[in-house]
Amino acid sequence: MDLLLVRHAEPVTIAAGHVEGPADPSLTDAGREQAERLAAWLAHEPVDTIVSSPQRRALETAAPVAAALHLDLEIVEGLAEYDWRVDHYIPTEQLMRSGDARFQAMLDGRWEEFGGDAPEEFTARVATAVDSLIARHPGGRVVAVCHGGVINCTVAKVIGLDRLLWFNPAYASIHRIAAARTGARSLVALNETAHLDARSR
């Protein structure tokens, strides 16, 4: 089967103390445009199933794709990001530019320091969710809209890399994994972004 992991489009920033409970940002105007371009691109592919993380930034990215493909959208709780319980959301690029200590903690896997999941719990949860998708859709093509951490650990497992966060998936990027019935998995494509400017040329 073919598994297309898609990172959510660009979300808004939510600073600590601005919401009660976990921060769950929606998309920016630019993010909504990215989601529409993603949908237009994937509308030309033979997709059988589309699933999404339960977090708003993933759902808002997945919704136009599901509409373009005329498919029902399934929510998969196991695809939630390691920060799903955190009371703020600062995009990675902002943390990096500002020299925020949370950026290094994020890279080091010290997610619990800012309210995130323990790395071993997160990787086990994601692996279970991905394994289930592959098992449930033999011979199919599945689009899974999720998050940078989910994509990092899933691809790392496929290529045998023992790191948590090792590359930066672009917003609304596509990452393709082929999963054989024998259990073998291979990386087909990483960080596809041509769809984000294809219509502007």
Image (spheres, rainbow, N blue to C red):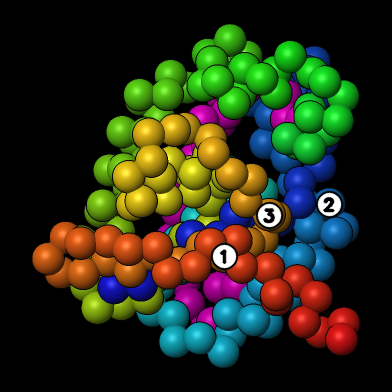
Quick one: label 3 or label 2, which is nearer the N terminus? 2
x and y, in percent, of residue 129 in the image: 32, 47
Question: Which type of secondary structure does the marked residue at label 1 adopt?
Answer: strand
Task: Answer whether residue 61 is magenta in the image.
Answer: no
Q: Are marks 3 and 2 in contact (CB under 8 Å)?
A: no
Query: In x, y percent, where is residue 176?
Result: 45, 67
Q: Position of residue 59 (x, y in %)?
A: 60, 55
Q: Residue at x 76, y 46 (%)?
A: 11
Q: CA distance from mark 2 to mark 1?
A: 19 Å
Check disc 2 and report the residue beneath it. Answer: 28
Dot 1 amino acid type: Ile
Identify the residue shown where x is 40% and y is 30%: 122
Q: The residue under label 2 is which amino acid type?
A: Thr
* Residue drawn at 51 percent across, 30 percent down: 82
State how far apart marks 3 and 2 are (Cα). Answer: 15 Å
Stretch in magenta = 65-90
Q: Seen in the image, is 38 located left or right of residue 158?
A: right
Asked where in the image residue 20 lies, by quadrant, the reply is: top right
Residue under label 1: 174
The N terminus: image quadrant:
bottom left
State whether residue 194 is above or below residue 130.
below
